[in-house]
Image: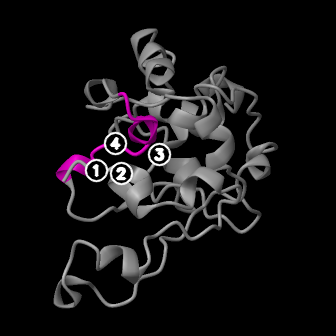
Amino acid sequence: MKLACATCHPAAAASTLATDNLLPSRQVCLGCHQESELPAPWQPMPTRVAFFSHAQHLKMGNVAPVIAAAIDRKTYLQPPGDIRARLNTQNPCEACHRGLEESAQAGRAVMPQMADCLVCHTKIDPPFSCEECHGQDAHLKPASHTPEFLDTHTNHTLHFDKSTCAVCHGVKFTCMGCH
């Protein structure tokens, strides 16, 4: 319907906490939808980020060109997939929340990637700086990092793409740093 993001998410512009519930109220939804179309009451998705301010980030304006430039310079810390094509937007919300126009419901796919944050927030020193953004109880290890991962990840049959490690282990990460 080409609505402005703030139509349904009016609290986002003033939000300073990662735990703020920015979902639209039922009353907002009923402005366009019938009661029978609405899902059962929903809760925000759990977030692994402990500290985030929409208000502060919106003051910076549209960061899409900054993220696009990082992808173009090959300094974006994960394989970008189709992200670059989605950064031609004038909407500052869509710089980080990409793909909403194709989605009937927001999910993890339209949430910012850690690599988006690391375009500007470059002072990472894993595992020592993770708690600057993530809570102590955040489960950050990918599913591939099983207890036997330390023994099996060097198996040449696994075909790990080292570029996917940089988002957690930093730009200067080298395999020889641990081995």
* Circle 3/circle 2 CB separation < 8 Å: no
Type of the residue with mark 3: Pro
- Mark 3 highlights which residue? 112
Judge from the rendering whether residue 85 lies leftward or rightward of residue 179; answer left or right: left
Of mark 4 and mark 2, the one earlier in the sequence is 4
Give the amino acid type for the residue marked by disc 1 in the picture.
Leu
Residue under label 1, please give it: 100
Of the numbered discs 3 and 1, the one sitting upstream in the chain is 1
Q: Are marks 4 and 2 in contact (CB under 8 Å)?
A: yes
Does the magenta run of residues contain 101? Answer: yes
Q: Which residue is mark 4?
A: 98
Q: Are marks 3 and 1 in contact (CB under 8 Å)?
A: no
Mark 3 to mark 2: distance in Å? 7 Å
Q: Secondary structure at mark 1?
A: helix
Crowd around label 1: few <14 · some 14–19 · many ≥20 (10 Å):
some
Residue lying at the far top of the rendered structure: 73
Q: How many marks?
A: 4
